[in-house]
Amino acid sequence: MEILRLAAFSQNGQGGNPAGVAFCEEMPAAETMMSIAKEVGYSETAFLVKQADSWRVRYFAPELEVPFCGHATIALGAALGERFGGGTYNLILNDSTITVRASKTDLGFSAALQSPSTWTKDAPEEYVTRILSAFQLKKEQLDERFPIRIAGAGATHLIIFVKDRRTLSDMKYPFEEVRAIMAEQNLVTISLLWQESDSVIHSRNAFASGGVYEDPATGAAAAALAGYLRDIGWKGSKTFTILQGEDMGIPSRLNVFFTTKAGDSISVSGEVRKMG
């Protein structure tokens, strides 16, 4: 088994979210992949096996298997591009099939994924109250233009918008308490967001469910966010940028595009750099 270490959604060759990419002759047992993910130590490691004209992919965080991971998909797309050439690759996930396109750049490779279909639903009021309390957020700190909702695009996320950048910078939460609350709704991350403009959104993603306090770039959450914005009738640009990881000192940039069709796949793209 060969394991590559790549950082997805980097900015100008810096930052980005580290991911492991493991090329396998056959898919290992789940327990083995979990052990390897813990040893690699990143928020996710993707395991790939060639199947006809597609690649079977499974994603493991240090503490659980996730159905879809955006940054690891961007990383594996770049790895496929470097190994087999630029183009579009078919991926078979646990619950869906998607594609990732690899493109050569001056810095190496970038990749663009097409997410699973999107959906949103109301979050139970009592559940939201507990989350806000855990994050020490008051209702007057929330941006009332954006209702708190549960959103999915291959994985499930909670969307919370705040009114100002300072509130985003001050994000903190009790890890084990929030991890238990997230499990009740099968949340993969909690997305805390601030809208800078109609084309730029800042994000922080709590990833206690996967054994990680915060993710510096989250492609699955970006796709879920785009589906959410479409569902609430957001008037901003259908092509927008998510800036994430800044408060961690790991600047990351995610480029997102969505159509007007409800549930339609989301395009999420970004640069990839090799880790030392």
Image (tube, helix red, strand yellow):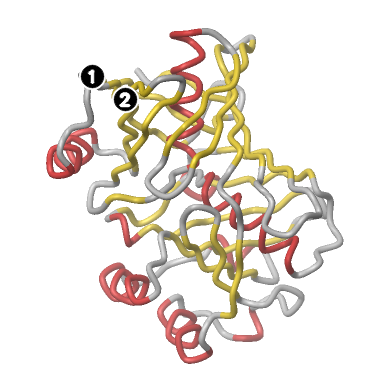
Residue 232: x and y, percent?
A: 75, 70
Which amino acid lies under the numbered mark 1 shown in the image of this protein? Answer: Glu
Question: Quick one: which residue is furthest to the front in this view?
Answer: 52
Above or below, comparing residue 36 to residue 34 in the picture? above
Sooner in the amino-acid sequence: mark 1 or mark 2: 1
Q: Quadrant of the N terminus?
A: top left
Cα distance, mark 1 to mark 2? Answer: 6 Å
Q: Nearer the viewer, residue 75 or 118?
A: 118
Residue 10: x and y, percent?
A: 55, 30
Kindly identify which residue carries mark 2.
49
Rendered residue at 63%/58% (across/down): 225
SS for callout 1: loop
Q: Nearer the viewer, residue 142 or 247?
A: 142
SS for callout 2: strand
Q: Quadrant of the C terminus?
A: top left
State the image quarter where residue 127 is shown: bottom left
Please state if 26 lies on the left or on the right of 134 as rendered.
Answer: left
Rendered residue at 46%/32% (across/down): 91
Count of picture labels: 2
Q: Is the residue under label 2 in contact with that under label 1 (CB below 8 Å)?
A: yes
Residue 160: x and y, percent?
A: 59, 70
Rendered residue at 29%/50% (across/down): 65
Rendered residue at 66%/40% (across/down): 267
Residue 31: x and y, percent?
A: 13, 44
| Image mark for residue 25 | 1
Question: Quick one: which residue is furthest to the right in this view?
Answer: 235
Q: Residues within 10 Å of mark 2 (few under 14, many from 20)?
A: some
State the image quarter where residue 226 is shown: bottom right
Above or below, comparing residue 90 to residue 139 in the picture? above
Which amino acid lies under the numbered mark 2 shown in the image of this protein? Answer: Val
